[in-house]
Image: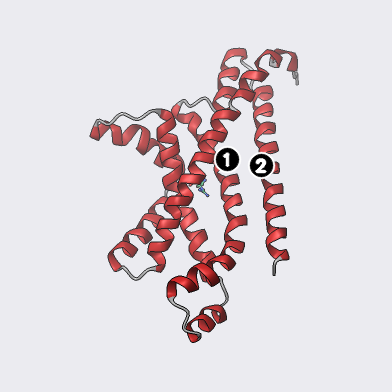
Amino acid sequence: MSLDFAQIVPYIPFIVNGIKVTLQVTLLSVVFGFIWGSLLALIKISNIRLLKGFAVAYTSVFRGTPLILQLTFVYFATPQITGYNISAFEAAVLTFTLNSGAYISETIRGGIMAVDKGQWEAAKALGVPYRKMMTDIILPQAVKNILPALVNETIALLKESALVSTIGLADIMQNANIVKGTIFRYFEPYLLAGLLYYVMVMLLTWVARVLERRMRRSD
Ligand code: ARG
């Protein structure tokens, strides 16, 4: 066994630099995914038959197929038959947004449905109009379930974002791949990549825990 960390020292900044792309893809996708997911959730709790059918099928497909396959479809397969041009970065954010929207829509729908039935009944019994019931009674309580789950979704996306290396985006994973190909050593560059992901995930985990505690305090 031989480890030689001296060899990767000159490449450390290069791998660390991948954090930028990793974070950009993750954060943009979670923000757009939240918007798209909210819309899907709204549709799912509505009574518009056709749209509802679409939202349910959409969620099923995006949760039922591998993310790496979806990425390949957006970046390679669809452009081949339609002729559209898309950069690797755009394809990554688009795919992760579409995928995350499916997961987030369920998080939001679940969060709303988890609000105690008595709250809905009381609001109805008091004659609170639907819209006011939603904005003033149901949603403020649903947020408690939804917010920590959204941080967890961000954690999932952050880790899954390593998949963008398969379409050549220079994220942490891809930069580690490049260093491996340059110095012909696997262990050291991937150890560093792993450390970087782990530290970011731990930071987010801490955020989730603080949020959860704060949400519970208001009960
Ligand atoms: N590994 C799963 C897949 O390949 C993860 C899907 C993404 N997860 C998420 N929460 N957006 O399908």
Give the mark count: 2
Mark 1 → mark 2, Cα distance in angstroms? 8 Å
* Mark 1 vs 2, N-terminal side: 1
Dividing the picture into quarters, in which one does residue 14 lie?
top right
Q: What residue type is labelled 1?
A: Leu
> Is residue 63 among the parts visible in the rendering?
no
Q: What residue type is labelled 2?
A: Val
Q: In this view, does 166 lie to the left or right of 76?
A: right
From the viewer's perspective, is residue 147 above or below residue 131?
A: above
From the viewer's perspective, is residue 139 above or below residue 165?
A: below
Residue wearing tag 2 = 201
* Quadrant where the C terminus is found in the figure: bottom right
Q: Nearer the viewer, residue 143 or 92?
A: 143
Q: How crowded is mark 1: few (under 14 residues within 10 Å), some or many (20 or more)?
A: many
Dividing the picture into quarters, in which one does residue 87 lie?
top left
User: Looking at the image, do the residues carrying marks 1 and 2 touch, with CB atoms under 8 Å apart?
Assistant: yes
Q: Is mark 1 on a helix, strand or loop?
A: helix
From the viewer's perspective, is residue 26 above or below residue 17?
A: below
Q: Position of residue 67 (x, y in %)?
A: 45, 43
From the viewer's perspective, is residue 9 above or below residue 166?
A: above
Q: Which residue lies furthest to the left in this view?
A: 82
Q: Residues within 10 Å of mark 2 (few under 14, many from 20)?
A: some
- Residue beneath the point at 46% across and 42% down: 96
- Residue beneath the point at 28% across and 64% down: 50
Residue wearing tag 1 = 158
